[in-house]
Amino acid sequence: MAVVGIKKDQITNNITKFVQVGNYSFRNLSFSTRVANSISHRMEAVEKQLSEMSSALQKLTKEMVVWSGKKVTEGFNKINKAVEEINQKINALLGTTTRNKGKSGHKKGRHSL
């Protein structure tokens, strides 16, 4: 944030300015009223642009979080699908093995009677 302090010089029609931008400060800068007003308007414009950029960055950050969340969800869905397919294959193999054993055991049981 930029802070501007202005005090009227008694001898001339110039304005003595104290300007602080961030950690930097400039003291006893002398400008004509016209230049001082121009600087003031430009600083207002810069602050407005910074505010707009900050808002845009916040929106972008929110969109990135949502986008990242979607990607994470898609990744988990792919993993879950792969695990499900593996489970189905395992169950199919176990089911085939169990059925064969069950049938052969059942037949043996009939023959032994």
Image: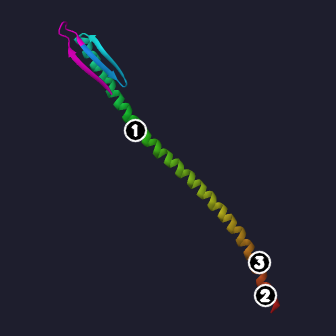
User: Which residue is the site of mark 1?
Assistant: 58
Query: Which mark, residue 109?
Result: 2
Choose top left, top right, bottom left or bottom right for residue 9. top left
Residue under numbered circle 3:
101
10 falls in the magenta region: yes
Residue found at x 21% / y 16%? 7
**What's the distance in space between the residues labelled 1 and 3, CA to CA?**
64 Å
Between label 1 and label 2, give the one nearer the viewer: 1
- Picture residue at 46% right of the left edge, 44% below the top: 65
Secondary structure type for disc 3: helix
Instruction: Name the residue type under label 2.
Output: Gly
Task: For label 1, count other residues whose C-alpha is less than 10 Å away and answer few (under 14), some (14-19) or many (20+).
Answer: few
Tell me: residue 83, above or below residue 58.
Answer: below
The kind of residue tagged 1 is Gln
Magenta residues span 1-15
Closer to us: mark 1 or mark 3?
1
Residue 31's disc is none
First in residue order: circle 1 vs circle 2: 1
Q: Earlier in the sequence, mark 3 or mark 2?
A: 3
